[in-house]
Image (tube, rainbow, N blue to C red):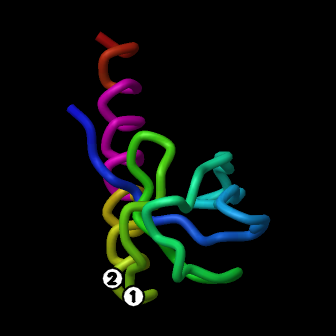
Amino acid sequence: MCLAVPARIIELEDDRAVVDALGNRWNIRTTLTPEVRMGDIVLIHAGFAIAKVDEEDAKETWQLIAELDAFQEEQNKKSEQD
């Protein structure tokens, strides 16, 4: 399954950018979203920014990702105890 993840642009030169999401950084291309600027939050899919997104929407998504991560960690601990 593939999904787009929101990330903040922290470096930008031409159509190349570095983005950060929850401390993870990726090199991406902004070819499909030439209007984006430093500090913008974009949806990342397959190495490309595919859309600019609102900060509140991004925060909600980041919170859900953190909750899923915590759930997975709890499941892993339970599996190790069995």
Location of residue 67 with respect to 38 vertically, above or below: above
Residue at (70%, 80%) from the top-left corner? 38
Q: Front-most of 7 and 14? A: 14
**Callout 1, which amino acid?**
Asp
Q: Nearer the viewer, mark 2 or mark 1?
A: 1
Q: Position of residue 1 (x, y in %)?
A: 21, 32
Residue at (64%, 82%) from the top-left corner? 37
Residue at (31%, 63%) from the top-left corner? 64
Q: Which residue is mark 2?
A: 57
Q: Which residue is mark 1?
A: 54
Give the secondary structure at mark 2.
helix
Q: Position of residue 59 (x, y in %)?
A: 42, 78
Residue 68: say if magenta.
yes
Packing grade of label 1 (10 A; few <14, some 14-19, many >=20) is few
Location of residue 21 with respect to 2 vertically, above or below: below
Give the residues drawn in magenta, as a range.
Answer: 67-77
Q: Front-most of 55 and 29? A: 29
Q: Position of residue 23 (x, y in %)?
A: 67, 56
Give the secondary structure at mark 1.
loop
Q: Position of residue 41 (x, y in %)?
A: 52, 77
Q: CA distance from mark 2 to mark 1?
A: 5 Å
